[in-house]
Image: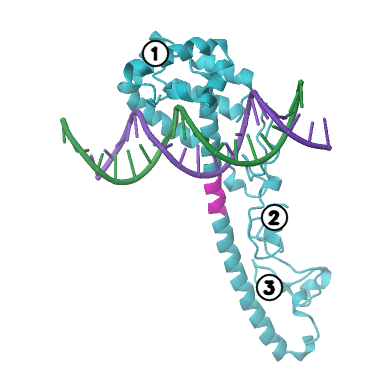
Chain colours: A cyan, B purple, C green
Amino acid sequence: MDFNDVCNTGLVLGLGLTASAQESSSPSKAPKNKACSNFTPTSFEPSLTLGLSGENYHQVVPRKIIDVNKGYEESIDLYRQASPPHSAVSSFSSGRVKRERDLSSEEVEAADRVSSRISDEDEDGPNARKKLRLTKEQSALLEESFKQHSTLNPKQKQALARQLNLRPRQVEVWFQNRRARTKLKQTEVDCEFLKKCCETLTDENRRLQKELQELKALKLAQPLYMHMPAATLTMCPSCERIGGVGENASKSPFSMAPKPHFYNPFTNPSAAC
DNA sequence: ATGCGGGCTTGGTTTACCTCA
DNA sequence: CATGAGGTAAACCAAGCCCGC
């Protein structure tokens, strides 16, 4: 169901936006059971077009990273360059079976895992959960990649990890979190949109109720039209004139309408004129 | 057709790190 | 300068789905 349909059916609000949405293209298999992953309600509301919200994060992340780069992050970077995918990263995974699944699949990471364990036990113990802050460049590249595909296939993950000097697991996690943030952002935007929609429809409902009252009063005052069903009377919301279809509509204030005329505030307000 | 394991996703949570008052 | 609160994001976990065997 299109969102326009939702609006046109009356005062009903719902999250039926996905029908007109655009699924983000994904190179890997997309989940077929998830109805609302990554959509942009562009077909009905141009002002609310929503990309992958990368812009926002682009603005936030670098700000932090730039500051960070002066101190901590810079040292991390140097550290990383000195001993590649070193695990200033999360190497606490040594005791976790699930993590091992990811790591053991790649030769590249076998050595990495070993060094991770060593470093952890040396520094913080086996269960330490050290966190890596990605550098500005890493974030930018990840964002760039995310704009192209919101999900990664194993090859892409590997390539990106190599390029960024990160572990594939880190790239994977970054994409997971990025998708989650995108969805959250999208939900917030949708929520705002629906609030506005609700307000507009409430106003419209109020106005129509008022018109109905006026028409009822008019009907009582003018017996000539007493046999006309109220539902067949239409009124243009913009010019506030009662009208209808056909050429005779302009001659008579009342006319027979083929169907109830609902005003959709999100299309063309004056289309009925 | 059915069961199983692996790989993937999402949703939610935890927690290290950062910023700012 | 120290500190605590709050925010951000990296990492984790659980559950569910899909697919190949």
Q: Which residues are magenta?
A: A186-193
Q: Report in which chain the residue with disc 2 lies.
A: A
Mark 1 Cα within 10 Å, few/some/many (few <14, many 20+)?
some
Mark 2 Cα within 10 Å, few/some/many (few <14, many 20+)?
some
Q: Report in which chain the residue with disc 1 lies.
A: A
Alpha-carbon span between mark 1 and mark 3: 80 Å
Q: Mark 1 or 2 closer to N-term?
A: 2
Q: Main secondary structure of the magenta part?
A: helix
Q: Determine whether A67 is above or below A271 in the image.
A: above
Q: In what element is the residue under mark 1?
A: helix
Q: Amino acid at mark 2?
A: Asn
Instruction: Count numbered badges in the picture.
Output: 3
Report which residue position mark 1 lands on: A118
- Which quarter of the rendered picture does the C terminus of chain A lie within? bottom right
Q: Can residue A152 be spotted in the picture?
A: yes
Q: Amino acid at mark 3?
A: Arg
Mark 2 touches mark 3? (CB < 8 Å): no
Report which residue position mark 3 lands on: A241
In the rendered image, residue A222, in percent from the top left (x then y), is placed at 73, 89
Q: Amino acid at mark 1?
A: Ile
Q: In what element is the residue under mark 2?
A: helix
Q: Report in which chain the residue with disc 3 lies.
A: A
